[in-house]
């Protein structure tokens, strides 16, 4: 099979995941579902953050890895709490990461 | 506001995630070329598939001669989390025409979902804004793929520099301001525990789905209970 056919398959399964809910959920959702969906963003965001900070890809799946990234994330969280500014949060978080890595080695 | 002005707003609001995305577009290109893909095949995957994590994985699998079906199945597992992002986005833009929602679905990603939802919770849903945000990320992903292909070996490994931290740090900037009440704090704590536990045992990005579905359900349940609770202070025994 050509690589372009593989791409077509990859694009199809990816598009399906993105499109099916967007195309099907078009009426007013029941109140319980609306409330549930309202709390999805902070849950998804947290799930995108925490494993990226405290785990790493090993040879057999993800493993726990508590390194300088954890300190950087804590600094980032404090900065975000105070400033609500993404650029400052990323900048100071990265600075903290490099500093911790420099000190700890 | 005119349609174009809204698209433009979405495009510009997404600049904030460019620094986290561009280095990885470049590295994707370098690793794709070194896995034996041509320039057009490298750029083609960015344009057609447009899903960072699964593109990296596919490159690794192409390099090891994996069967196309296992590459496609792996892509489906990695991108299953988009079901939840799309359901959440749908709750804001479901009044828009079908063709527009079908268009928005092409480029919905973690990053543009975050930019869109931030706007929608404050100003109401707008599919044109989401489209502008999506186009912004599509543009930077394609451009960084081209730059990475041209500069090739000149680019240092961004993971070695710790640049893979930009992604969670950007999301921390989005998330922490949302956690100003007890329901959201409990929800985030729960999402952290569930996502890490799932990430350690299941492959792909199931951890986004498990934590996203379960923690938000608990959040909704807590919010519901708070609404139903009697308003007077609780000072009787029990």
Image (cartoon, coloured by chain):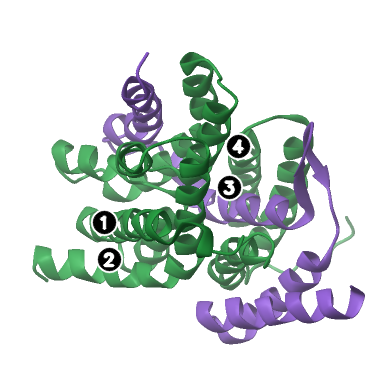
Chain colours: A purple, B green
Compared with B42, B114 (above or below) is below
Left of B223 or right of it: where is B11? Answer: left
* Mark 1 or mark 2, whichever is nearer to me: 1
Q: Mark 4 or mark 2, which has the lower sequence index?
A: 2
As helix, strand or loop, the secondary structure at mark 4 comes to: loop
* Mark 3 or mark 2, whichever is nearer to me: 2
| Number of residues whose C-alpha sits closer than 10 Å to that of mark 3, classed few (under 14), some (14–19) or many (20 or more) | many
Whole-number angstrom distance, CA of label 1 to CA of label 2? 9 Å
Residue at mark 3 shares a chain with residue at mark 2: yes
Say which chain tag 4 marks.
Answer: B
Q: Mark 3 or mark 4, which has the lower sequence index?
A: 4
Residue at mark 3 shares a chain with residue at mark 4: yes
Left of A77 or right of it: where is B150? Answer: left
As helix, strand or loop, the secondary structure at mark 2 comes to: helix
Residue furthest to the left:
B2
As helix, strand or loop, the secondary structure at mark 1 comes to: helix
| Residue B59 numbered tag | none
Q: In which quarter of the image is residue B38?
A: top left
| Residue B10 numbered tag | 2
Q: Where is residue A47 in the image (x, y as percent from the top left)?
A: 64, 49
Query: Which residue is rendered at x = 62% and y = 66% of the image?
Result: B163
As helix, strand or loop, the secondary structure at mark 3 comes to: helix
For disc 1, the marked residue is: B135
Q: Mark 1 or mark 2, which has the lower sequence index?
A: 2
| Residue B205 numbered tag | 4
Say which chain tag 2 marks.
Answer: B
Q: Where is residue B209 in the image (x, y as percent from the top left)?
A: 59, 37
- Cβ atoms under marks 1 and 2 closer than 8 Å: yes
Residue at mark 4 shares a chain with residue at mark 1: yes
């Amino acid at each position: 099979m050509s690589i372009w056919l593989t791409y077509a398959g990859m694009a199809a399964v990816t598009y399906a995941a993105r499109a099916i809910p967007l195309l099907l959920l078009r009426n007013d959702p029941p109140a319980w579902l609306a409330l549930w969906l309202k709390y999805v963003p902070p849950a998804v965001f947290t799930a995108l953050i925490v494993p990226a900070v405290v785990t790493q890809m090993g040879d057999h799946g993800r493993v726990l890895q508590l390194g300088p990234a954890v300190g950087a994330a804590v600094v980032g969280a404090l900065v975000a709490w105070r400033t609500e500014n993404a650029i400052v949060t990323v900048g100071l978080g990265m600075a903290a990461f490099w500093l911790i890595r420099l000190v700890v080695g | 506001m005119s349609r174009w002005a809204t698209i433009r707003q979405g495009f510009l609001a997404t600049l904030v995630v460019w620094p986290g995305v561009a280095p990885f577009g470049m590295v994707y290109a370098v690793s794709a070329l070194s896995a034996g893909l041509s320039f057009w095949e490298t750029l083609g995957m960015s344009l057609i598939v447009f899903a960072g994590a699964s593109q990296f994985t596919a490159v690794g699998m192409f390099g090891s001669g994996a069967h196309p079906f296992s590459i496609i199945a792996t892509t489906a597992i990695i991108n299953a989390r988009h079901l939840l992002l799309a359901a959440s986005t749908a709750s804001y833009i479901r009044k828009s025409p079908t063709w527009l929602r079908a268009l928005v679905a092409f480029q919905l990603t973690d990053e543009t979902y975050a930019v869109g939802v931030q706007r929608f919770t404050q100003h109401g849903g707008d599919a044109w804004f989401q489209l502008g945000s999506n186009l912004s990320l599509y543009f930077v992903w394609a451009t960084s793929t081209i730059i990475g292909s041209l500069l090739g070996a000149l680019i240092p490994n961004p993971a070695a520099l710790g640049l893979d931290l930009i992604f969670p740090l950007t999301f921390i900037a989005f998330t922490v301001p949302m956690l100003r009440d007890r329901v959201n704090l409990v929800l985030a704590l729960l999402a952290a525990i569930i996502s890490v536990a799932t990430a350690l045992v299941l492959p792909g990005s199931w951890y986004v789905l498990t934590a996203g579905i379960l923690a938000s359900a608990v959040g909704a349940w807590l919010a519901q209970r708070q609404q139903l609770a009697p308003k007077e202070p609780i000072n009787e025994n029990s």
